[in-house]
Image: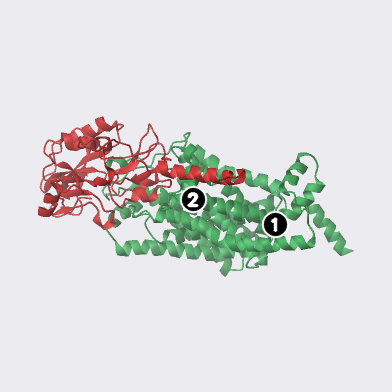
């Protein structure tokens, strides 16, 4: 090792950052399926996917802030961004995605509900909803039509933005020429597809969980469609990762011996066992079963839950292996170091756990504030009205 | 010129941002030093290095480098005839206290001093998100300690392992080529104390600098030339096994 390399620079928090932004991008792309590509089957997950994306996007910069030596200076990235730095664009890409895409789309989609609730609720809730209307209580057919069109346009803009958000995260790693484990033009593409995989998986799991909590029947047509998309995206993602791996093995450049040794020793469990076998091959196999065999609803549900959970573990392991794995070997290719993760520390495991749970807490609050499903009472009334 | 309140409100933030840009790229001031009249580099004649570690000790003292971190260090290579690409390298405490006697039999042993390569196309400068790391007009890669966020991207980007995060300041730290000394006409601390003349500060813009004669008459090499960083740390006598 070069003597300054013994200490790892990027910790578990930097593992968390691409993991969280990946969920944002993936969830948004799933939502756009319904909005732009008119895939009606996934409609029940549309709003949930948007809220999930928002909850994770709110938390995404926190691990970065906690990691900085001087978080109080981070605003400098906005004031004096360095044009040649991939990282400098983070603040702008993030703000663009948060404010110009996600928040705006959610607001437009929920505007009718917000206006209705600002009139039907009382107390502090009324105040919150009134504030959320931003002073516009016009929910005439004409204005809702405009909302719909604007929302569609924002989703169209949002798809490349989601690609940009996560492809760019991949570029931060892929453009480091000093590090052969990272330096690859495939990195942004691999990050993007793995993001879509994790985003689709989390929305599928959350949808099933929410149905279970609300004691409602799961719309199997919807979950089957989501699982099908997960399966196809996963195959592309796996193919890209294998292409990268095969390319490295066949080319066997000067870094190969060092990286190969690392994969067979320090990264064997997290890369070969958890990421590739448990987190990729097994869920792809399980999802393939649901595509090939005619399984009962109960069995399909069990498979989706198992495959979804394994996918999440696999994608987290992928982020771990990229970020931590990329720092375990020396840039001289002559030596290795070890990552020692603290528990109660600023960049320790406890912080990572809290930051992983936090988006779910935010999502719970968002779901309470902006329910992603139709109100049962109003559904019953409209059903009764249509029956009359 | 009449400026309305509205125009002033628009101009003030713009002026603040412009001022930040100016401050961001200003190296340490030194009277009577013409920054554009120099282009600094370093010559390492490793055929002369005896691995005494004086350079690393002097650097630590001069620049208050914390223990366990290195602005410069010395590596000892052991290369056998049948494994030229896989040398054995050691650098106990960065070679600060010299090296224990070599135990490996056969092959050859030699020392390689390492430091920031002062790249003209430095990857660390390229990736800094706020421009806290910059190449000064006289070719030295510097870090503005009052501006660095401590994001560590530059540490990842340096192919030579020359950067670290100072645990006291929590900012990126590296060899400054003793900028506080060379701008006053002195040489670097490591060159000053080197007993064999292995390290020689070089001013490539000074026609009278002996570096020009040396470069004309010797074959020199830079580390990791395939990365095209335009390193200005020239090694004479560099073995192909050195990374």
Q: Residue at x 29, y 33 (%)?
A: B65
Residue toward you, B182 or A10 = B182
Q: Which residue is drawn at 36% across and 35% down?
A: B166
Which residue matches tag 1? A109
Q: In the rendered picture of this protein, how many numbered marks are placed on residues?
A: 2
Q: In this view, does A380 lie to the left or right of A151?
A: right
Residue B47 visible? The answer is: yes
Locate residue A378, reporting x and y percent. Answer: 81, 55
Chain letter matching colour red: B
Callout 2: SS: helix
Q: Distance from label 1 to label 2 (Cα)?
A: 27 Å
Q: In this view, does A200 lie to the left or right of A135?
A: left
Chain A's shade in the image? Answer: green
Which residue matches tag 2? A90
Q: In which quarter of the image is residue A183?
A: bottom left
Locate residue A83, reporting x and y percent. Answer: 43, 52
What quarter of the picture does the N terminus of chain A occupy?
top left
């Amino acid at each position: 090792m070069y003597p300054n390399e013994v200490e790892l620079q990027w910790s578990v928090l930097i593992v968390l950052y691409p993991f969280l932004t990946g969920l944002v991008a993936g969830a948004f792309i799933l939502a756009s399926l319904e909005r732009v590509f008119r895939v009606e089957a996934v409609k029940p997950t549309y709003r949930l996917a948007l809220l999930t994306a928002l909850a994770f996007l709110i938390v995404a910069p926190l691990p970065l802030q906690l990691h900085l030596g001087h978080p109080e200076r981070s605003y400098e990235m906005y004031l004096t961004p360095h044009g040649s730095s991939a990282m400098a664009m983070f603040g702008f890409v993030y703000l663009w995605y948060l404010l110009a895409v996600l928040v705006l789309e959610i607001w437009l989609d929920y505007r009718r509900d917000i206006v209705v609730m600002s009139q039907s609720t009382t107390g502090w809730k009324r105040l919150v909803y009134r504030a959320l209307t931003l002073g516009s209580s016009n929910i005439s057919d004409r204005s809702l039509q405009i909302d719909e069109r604007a929302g569609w346009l924002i989703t169209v803009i949002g798809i490349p933005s989601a690609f940009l958000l996560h492809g760019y995260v991949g570029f931060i790693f892929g453009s480091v020429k000093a590090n052969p484990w990272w330096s690859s033009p495939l990195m942004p593409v691999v990050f993007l597809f793995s993001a879509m995989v994790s985003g689709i998986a989390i929305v599928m799991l959350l949808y099933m969980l929410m149905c279970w909590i609300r004691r409602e029947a799961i719309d199997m047509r919807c979950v089957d469609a989501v699982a099908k998309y997960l399966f196809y995206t996963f195959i592309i993602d796996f193919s890209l990762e294998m292409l990268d791996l095969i390319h490295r093995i066949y080319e066997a450049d000067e870094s190969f011996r060092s990286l190969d040794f690392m994969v067979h020793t320090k990264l064997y469990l997290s890369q070969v066992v958890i990421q590739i076998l448990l987190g990729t091959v097994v869920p792809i196999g399980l999802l393939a079963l649901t595509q090939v065999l005619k399984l009962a609803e109960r069995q399909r549900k069990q498979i989706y839950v198992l495959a979804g959970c394994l996918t999440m573990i696999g994608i987290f392991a992928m982020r771990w292996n990229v970020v931590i794995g990329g720092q375990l070997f020396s840039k001289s290719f002559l030596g290795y170091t070890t990552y020692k993760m603290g528990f109660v520390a600023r960049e320790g495991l406890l912080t990572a756990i809290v930051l992983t749970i936090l988006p779910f807490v935010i999502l719970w609050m968002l779901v309470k504030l902006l329910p992603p499903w139709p109100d049962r009472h109003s559904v019953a009334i409209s059903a009764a009205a249509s029956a009359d | 010129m009449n400026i309305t309140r509205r125009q002033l409100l628009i101009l003030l933030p713009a002026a603040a941002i412009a001022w930040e840009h100016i401050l961001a790229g200003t190296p340490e001031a030194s009277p009577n030093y013409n920054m554009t009249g120099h282009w600094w580099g370093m010559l390492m004649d490793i055929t002369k290095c005896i691995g005494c570690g004086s350079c690393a000790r002097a650097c630590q003292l001069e620049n208050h480098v914390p223990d366990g971190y290195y602005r410069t260090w010395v590596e000892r290579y052991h290369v056998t005839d049948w494994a030229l690409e896989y040398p054995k390298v050691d650098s106990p405490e960065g070679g600060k206290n010299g090296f224990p006697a070599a135990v490996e039999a056969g092959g050859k042993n030699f020392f390689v001093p390492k430091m920031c390569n002062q790249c003209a196309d430095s990857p660390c400068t390229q990736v800094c998100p706020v421009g806290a790391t910059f190449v000064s007009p006289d070719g030295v890669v510097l870090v503005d300690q009052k501006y660095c966020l401590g994001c560590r991207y530059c540490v990842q980007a340096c192919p030579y392992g020359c950067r670290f995060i100072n645990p006291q300041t929590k900012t990126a730290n590296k060899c400054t080529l003793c900028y506080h000394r060379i701008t006053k006409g002195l040489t670097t601390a490591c060159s000053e104390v080197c007993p064999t003349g292995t390290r020689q500060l070089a001013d490539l813009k000074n026609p009278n600098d002996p570096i020009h004669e040396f470069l004309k008459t010797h074959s020199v090499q830079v580390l990791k030339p395939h990365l095209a960083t335009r390193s200005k740390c020239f090694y004479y006598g560099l073995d192909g096994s050195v990374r």
